[in-house]
Amino acid sequence: MKEVRELRFSQDHLWARLEEDGRVVIGISDYLQEKLGEIYSLQLPEEGDEVVKDETFGILEAQNGREELLAPVSGEIIEVNYELNDVPELANEEPYDDGWLLRLEMTAPSDFNELLTEDEYEEYLKEEEEYDFDEDYEEDYPPEDREEE
């Protein structure tokens, strides 16, 4: 695996990596690919298209469902990883390397700094997993069905 430069993450589980030339590469996080299971297909925009932060830019179809991909930053697409059309499982096997999705020329460079650092993202995942657990507990054991202690 190539050396990973600083990654930032969105709360929608996409990562962004700032390249030396100021461009940004984006992809899905390891957490998201594990949650979704085997990826069957990706619908991605074309080179030259614009993406807007927090708006849908693609769709991922996987074993455990369908996921709308929300852009972590705004910019013009300068490269699409078309290899994913033929080998979508690269997004599972190498999400931070050969499984990248898009390369962008950012239109709002400040977007990158607003994303979560790796440490902040790890903390966010812990909170999200606790929330998911609490939500599952409430569904399985509604308050009216719990015995008084």
Image (cartoon, helix red, strand yellow):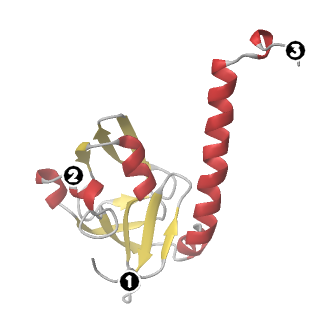
45 is higher (above) or lower (below) than 5: above
Tag 3 secondary structure: loop
* Kind of residue at badge 3: Glu
- The answer to whether residue 117 shows anywhere in this view is no
**In the displayed image of the protein, which residue is found farthest to the bottom?**
20
Give me the disc on residue 148.
Answer: 3
Residue 108 in percent (x, y) is at 52, 72
Say which amino acid is labelled 2.
Glu
- Check the image and report above or below for 88 versus 1: above
Q: Looking at this rendering, what residue extends furthest in the top direction? A: 145
Q: Nearer the viewer, residue 17 or 4?
A: 4
Horizontally, residue 75 falls left or right of residue 92, namely: right
Q: Residues within 10 Å of mark 2 (few under 14, many from 20)?
A: some
Q: Which residue is mark 2?
A: 89
Among the two numbered marks 1 and 3 on one chain, the one whose residue lies closer to the N terminus: 1
Quadrant assignment for the N terminus: bottom left
For the point 44% across and 69% down, the residue is: 16
Q: CA distance from mark 2 to mark 3?
A: 49 Å
Image disc number at residue 19 = 1
How far from the left and from the top, in percent, is residue 138?
A: 69, 24
Q: Which is nearer the N-term, disc 1 or disc 2?
A: 1
Element type at marker 1?
loop
- Which residue is at a point 56% across and 54% down the rendered structure image? 11
Circle number at residue 2 = none
In percent of width and height, residue 57 lies at 37, 51
User: Does the rendering let one see residue 23?
Assistant: yes
Image side of residue 91 versus residue 125, left or right: left
Q: Give the distance between the C-alpha atoms of the residues marked 1 and 3, in whole angstroms.
A: 57 Å
Q: Quadrant of the C terminus?
A: top right
The amino acid at mark 1 is: Glu
